[in-house]
Structures are given as structure tokens and as C-alpha cells.
């Protein structure tokens, strides 16, 4: 049985776990404050690659989360770190929003609109047909193909909206290729990098998320405890695995607040 109070780092998924669209779950705001008071590290670990971490942070503060009670680490951050470390000299074409593109440039990544070595696909909420066409051409021509995250839909106030995973499917239909590397959850690299930065062991952390194939799968692969919340994508009926393999399941983060 998981002893929550002994954990040092509490890693939260964003969409569907602590908020939906621009609405925060009030219990999540209280939970962050409480954990912060208890001296715990609170990190929002998101696959959402439509914005930079700074922008996610600002948006969360706008929604009512208290500044300085949490930090944000996203699939964009991990992708940038990966490109800087493994492909420092490569030219990159990014299918992504302008702000994420600027973040790539700020980090010294060379962006190329014509002959990239690497094609990076992210959750491009500013997608145009021209960008998609160009991306498919580079993939067809043999560029190394990286995706920031595999999420099919992103929960929003209007219901599910197509995320990077849907764009991956479009590119596959056109080119026959799937990404050579998917950086975000469930790839455990994101967790490994983060734990290393924090100088923590897997048993010091707990991952809280609403999705089995990203949040919970990543925690499983990295060997850290996981809590599934039913406030986002997953429904009770989706839990088809044997009961003993189930992650700890709660209706929402409010149940965690009551446990602490
Ligand atoms: Mg989620």
C-alpha cells in the first residue's frame, strides 16, 4: 500500500487532473498549497506541447493556482534537452506553435524551414495545411522523426480536441511513417531526467494523472507509484486490467487532499 505522506515529490498531470481547459479544479489549488506548506515538491508534468512551461505556469496562476507552490516541466522542455544533448548540430523543422518555436530558438536550436535533419511534431494549435504538407514532405524524404507527445486528444471545455497523436496519425496516413522517437509520457525519460535534476529516487515520488496510456504507463515503466484520477479521460469501465495491477484509483485529486 502506498504511503502518500512519505513522498517527497508529487508529480501531477495537468489537463484532466488539475484543470479542464481554463478551469482549475478548486481541490487541486488547495492541494498544491497544502503540499507546499508540508515542504513537498509539487511539479506539473505535462505532455501539452502547445505552449512553453512558462506559459503553462502563467495560465495556471491565472486560473487561481498560487505562485511559488509548484513548477512545470513539459514534453517541450524534455524535447529541447534531448535535441541539445543528442543532436546539437542538427537543423530542425518544428510543426508547432510560434511560442514553442521561439523557445527552441532561445535554447540555441537551429530551425530550418527548408532542409531539416530532424522533423519535430508537437501539439500545433496553429496548424495550417502548408505546415502539415511541408512536414510530411520532410518525413517522406527521410528526416529523423521526433514527436513531443503521443496524446490523441486534449480535454478542453469544448470536449476533446485533436492533440499531437491525431497529427501523428495524419502524417502516418500520408507518409507511412510513425515517429522514430516519442519524447513525452509514457516515455520514462521525462521522469528519469526530472528525478535526476531533483536528486531523488523513484520511491520518493508519486505520479498523479487521468490517463492510463501516458501518466500511469510512464510511472509503471519508471518504477514509481501512481494514482489514477477519474476526473479526466479514463472512465471506471476502462480499467480492464486485473485488479491487483490497477493503480490506486480516486474520483479526483480531492480524495488526495482528504488523505493528507
Ligand atoms: Mg491528462
Image: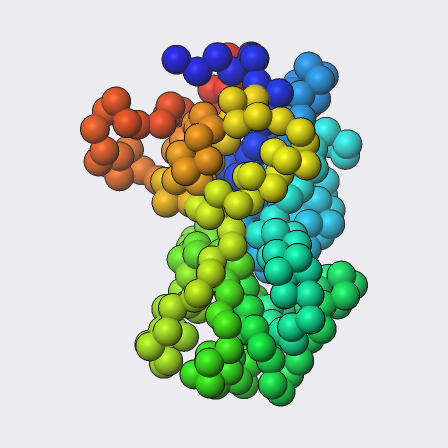
On screen, residue 181 above or below 175: above
Task: Return the residue nearer the eye: 85 or 68.
Answer: 85
Tell me which residue sits at (60%, 68%) in the image: 96
Image quadrant for the C terminus? top right
Residue 23 shows up from this direction: no
Q: Is residue 237 left or right of residue 71?
A: left
Tell me which residue sits at (60%, 42%) in the image: 193
- Where in the figure is residue 44, as x and y percent of width and height? 61, 38
On screen, residue 30 above or below 84: above
Task: Return the residue nearer the eye: 259 or 248.
Answer: 248
Tell me which residue sits at (64%, 44%) in the image: 73
On screen, residue 206 above or below 89: above
- Where in the figure is residue 176, as x and y percent of width and height? 33, 77
- Where in the figure is residue 1, as x and y percent of width and height? 39, 13
- Where in the figure is residue 226, as x and y percent of width and height? 44, 28
Task: Return the residue nearer the eye: 234 or 104.
Answer: 104
Amino acid at each position: 500500500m502506498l504511503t502518500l505522506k512519505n513522498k517527497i515529490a508529487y508529480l501531477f498531470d495537468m489537463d484532466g487532473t488539475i484543470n479542464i481547459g481554463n478551469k482549475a479544479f478548486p481541490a487541486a489549488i488547495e492541494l498544491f498549497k497544502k503540499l507546499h506548506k508540508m515542504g513537498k515538491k509539487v511539479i506539473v508534468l505535462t505532455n501539452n506541447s502547445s505552449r512553453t512551461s512558462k506559459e503553462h505556469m502563467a495560465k495556471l496562476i491565472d486560473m487561481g493556482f498560487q505562485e511559488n507552490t509548484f513548477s512545470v516541466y513539459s514534453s517541450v522542455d524534455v524535447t529541447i534537452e534531448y535535441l541539445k544533448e543528442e543532436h546539437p548540430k542538427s537543423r530542425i523543422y518544428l510543426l508547432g506553435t510560434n511560442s514553442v518555436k521561439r523557445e527552441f530558438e532561445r535554447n540555441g536550436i537551429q530551425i530550418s524551414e527548408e532542409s531539416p535533419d530532424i522533423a519535430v511534431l508537437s501539439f500545433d494549435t496553429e496548424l495550417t495545411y502548408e505546415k502539415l504538407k511541408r512536414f510530411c514532405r520532410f518525413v517522406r524524404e527521410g528526416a529523423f522523426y521526433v514527436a513531443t507527445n503521443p496524446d490523441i486528444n486534449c480535454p478542453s471545455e469544448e470536449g476533446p480536441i485533436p492533440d499531437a497523436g491525431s497529427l501523428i496519425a495524419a502524417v502516418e496516413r500520408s507518409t507511412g511513417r510513425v515517429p522514430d522517437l516519442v519524447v513525452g509520457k509514457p516515455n520514462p525519460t521525462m521522469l528519469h531526467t526530472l528525478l535526476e535534476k531533483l536528486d531523488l529516487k523513484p520511491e520518493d515520488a508519486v505520479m498523479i494523472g487521468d490517463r492510463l496510456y501516458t501518466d500511469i504507463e510512464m510511472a509503471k515503466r519508471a518504477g514509481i507509484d501512481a494514482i489514477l484520477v477519474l476526473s479526466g479521460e479514463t472512465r471506471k469501465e476502462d480499467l480492464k486490467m486485473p485488479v491487483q495491477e490497477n493503480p490506486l484509483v480516486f474520483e479526483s485529486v480531492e480524495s488526495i487532499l482528504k488523505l493528507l
